[in-house]
Amino acid sequence: MKANKQAAQKRGIYLLPNLLTTAGLFAGFYAVVASMQGAFASAAIAIFIAMIMDGLDGRIARMTNTQSDFGAEYDSMADMVSFGIAPALVIYNWALYDTGKIGWLAAFVYVVGAALRLARFNTQVTTADKRYFQGLASPSAAAIIAGLVWLGAEYQWESKPWGIYIAVMTMVVGLLMVSNFRYSSFKEVDWKGKIPFIGVLIIVLVFVLIASEPPLVLFSGFAIYALSGPIMTLWRIKDIKEERRQRKLQEAQSAEDHVESDDIEK
């Protein structure tokens, strides 16, 4: 009886984190449907909601000790829809439809970049430096695309004359996801620690700015973050090369130690 109960628990899935993942997936799907109906502001907002859900599901899973392999795989599939396919189709329906072949090719480059970014992240999650992301994270890339669409819808921009430039930007964002540029993950921040009083005022100011002009502030913030990767990587190129050299030496040393231990056992 007890064994059957344990087996049933293993076959089930945790409700809360997967519910949040499903909410993010729904938001991404809704963004596609809304863009097909011409509701581009709603589509962009839905992508940002998907970002919030994506940020919550993993943290809730860790806080409640409900992490699972199923949840990790489900989250990755949801991210592909919300931050890969949805932004590409939204930007295509808004600005790239009239550009012909270059328009759908640019959207496809973005989708491929998101897919490769997620696949690389999943294979390197246990070995990568937690302080940095290798390449622009797919939610941040989606925020740039969604922010631009939201800006255009908010200020009623005529996107047709700028279609080629928007296509180039879409491809650049897609390529940044599969680049080797380093982006800060902000995981070294101690969220439980204390901060100066001025820090609280800065946080309040940020919220006020976002509330005053959400599309402009969000697009500008994530665009600056996208530029920070190449700048930070080029600025620290010597340090990065030294870190890689030290890592290779450590790997070679550990391999030699393993061979020596095998010889001793023989």
Image (cartoon, helix red, strand yellow):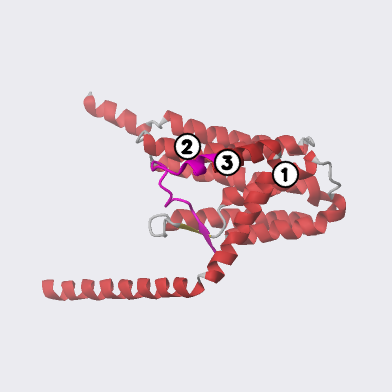
Which residue is painted at 60% across and 33% down in the image? Answer: 26
Q: Quadrant of the N terminus?
A: top left
Q: Give the residue type that dot 2 points to.
A: Asp
Residue beneath disc 2 = 57
- Marks 3/2: CA–CA distance: 10 Å
Q: Does residue 89 appear anywhere in the picture? A: no
SS for callout 2: helix
Residue 59's quadrant in the figure? top left
For the view shown, which residue lies furthest in the front direction? 197
Give the camera-side residue of 173 and 214.
Answer: 214
Give the camera-side residue of 260 and 57.
Answer: 57
Q: Of callouts 3 and 2, which one flags the residue occurring earlier in the amino acid sequence?
A: 3
**Picture mark count:** 3
Residue 169's quadrant in the figure? bottom right
What is the span of residues highlighted in magenta in the rendered image? 181-201
Residue beneath disc 3 = 51
For the view shown, which residue lies furthest in the left direction? 265
Prevailing secondary structure class for the magenta stretch in the rendered image: loop
Contact? badges 3 and 2 (CB < 8 Å): no
Q: Residues within 10 Å of mark 3 (few under 14, many from 20)?
A: many
Give the camera-side residue of 74 and 181.
Answer: 181
Q: Residue 86's spot in the image, x, y percent?
A: 66, 44
SS for callout 1: helix
